[in-house]
Amino acid sequence: MSDRILLIETSTSLCSVALAEEGRITASRESVEPRAHAALTAPFVQQVLQEKGLRAADLDAVCVSAGPGSYTGLRVGVSTAKGVCFAAGVPLLSVGTLDVLVAQAAADGLLPAGCRRVIPMIDARRMEVYTAVFTPDGQRLTEVEPRVIDADSFRQERAEGPVLFIGDGAGKCSEALAGPDAHFAQVCPRAAAMLAPAMQEFRAGNFRDVAYFEPFYLKDFVATVSRKKLF
C-alpha cells in the first residue's frame, strides 16, 4: 500500500490542499485569496491528483482539518472531503487544527531552543483566540477553548521556560504576552503540516463516519443582519 492521503486545510484565511504518498508530500496547492475557499478547494484537489496522474479512487484516505476555525472555511473543507470520500469510496480522517499547528512548528523548525510548551492560537476576532496548551511533541495538556488574551494569560507556562505561540492569532497577542521566553510565529496552518498527525490517525484506523462527521466549530456561527432599510 502506498498510503496515499489527500490533505485538506481550510480553517483559516489560507486555502491549502496537499497529497501525501508513502509518508511524504508529493504535490500541493495554496492560496490566500480572500473569501475564495469555496471556489478553490475542489479545483486544488483535482490539480494535485492530476499532477501525479491519479484518480480519487487511488487514494487510501482523505484527511480534513476539523477545527476550530472559520465557520465557512471549515464547512468548505469538510464538504469537499466528504464529496471525495463518497464519490471514490475512500475513508475519511480528521485532525484538529491546533494539532496541525503544533506539527507545523516542529516540521518547519520553529521551536525555540529548550521549548517547554507550544500554544497554538487561531484568531477569533478582537483579543480572543481558540487555543490549548501542548508539549512540543504534540501531546495536548489542556482542553481546546476560546480565550480572551491579556497580560495574565498563560503566566504559568511562560514562567516555566521557552514557549512558542503559533498561529494566525499569535501576532496580535505578542504585546500582551511579551517576555524573554515567549516566542511568536504568525502563520496559518498548512495542509502539508497535516502529514504526521494524519498518518497517526490512518495507521490507528481512526476513520470518521462520512455521513455524520461535523467540524469542531467551538462557537456557534452568528449571522449579522444589517439594520439599514432595504426599501
Image (spheres, rainbow, N blue to C red):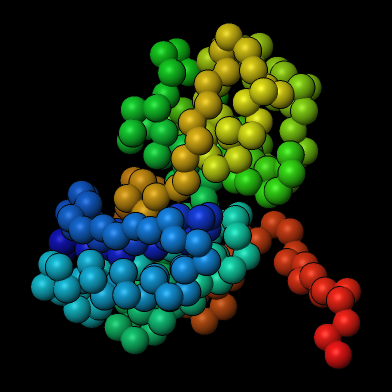
Q: Position of residue 197 (x, y in %)?
A: 39, 48
Q: Position of residue 23 (x, y in %)?
A: 21, 50
**Which sits in the foreground, 33 or 120?**
33
Q: Position of residue 181 (x, y in %)?
A: 56, 12
User: Residue placed farthest to the top in the image?
Assistant: 180
User: Residue placed farthest to the left in the image?
Assistant: 53
**Location of residue 174 with respect to 42 vertically, above or below:** above
User: Residue placed farthest to the bottom in the image?
Assistant: 231
Q: Is residue 187 left or right of residue 126?
A: left
Please tell me how many numbered marks the rendered image carries.
0
**Location of residue 160 with respect to 204 vertically, above or below:** above
Measuring 82% from the left and 74% from the top, which residue is drawn there?
Answer: 226
Q: Is residue 48 left or right of residue 130?
A: left
Hey, which quadrant is residue 81 in on the image? bottom left
Measuring 15% from the left and 61% from the top, which residue is drawn there?
Answer: 2
Measuring 47% from the left and 68% from the top, which residue is drawn there?
Answer: 36
**Which sits in the foreground, 129 or 210?**
129
Measuring 23% from the left and 80% from the top, which residue is drawn there?
Answer: 57
**Which sits in the foreground, 65 or 198?**
65
Visible residue check, residue 65: no
**Location of residue 99 with respect to 136 vertically, above or below:** below
Hey, which quadrant is residue 137 in on the image? top left
User: Residue placed farthest to the front in the image?
Assistant: 231
Q: Is residue 163 left or right of residue 100?
A: right
Instruction: Please identify the quadrant where the C terminus is shown.
Output: bottom right
Visible residue check, residue 86: yes
Instruction: Please identify the quadrant where the N terminus is shown.
Output: bottom left
Hey, which quadrant is residue 6 in on the image? bottom left
Q: Position of residue 19 (x, y in %)?
A: 25, 60
**Location of residue 126 with respect to 36 vertically, above or below:** above
Q: Is residue 145 left or right of residue 76?
A: right
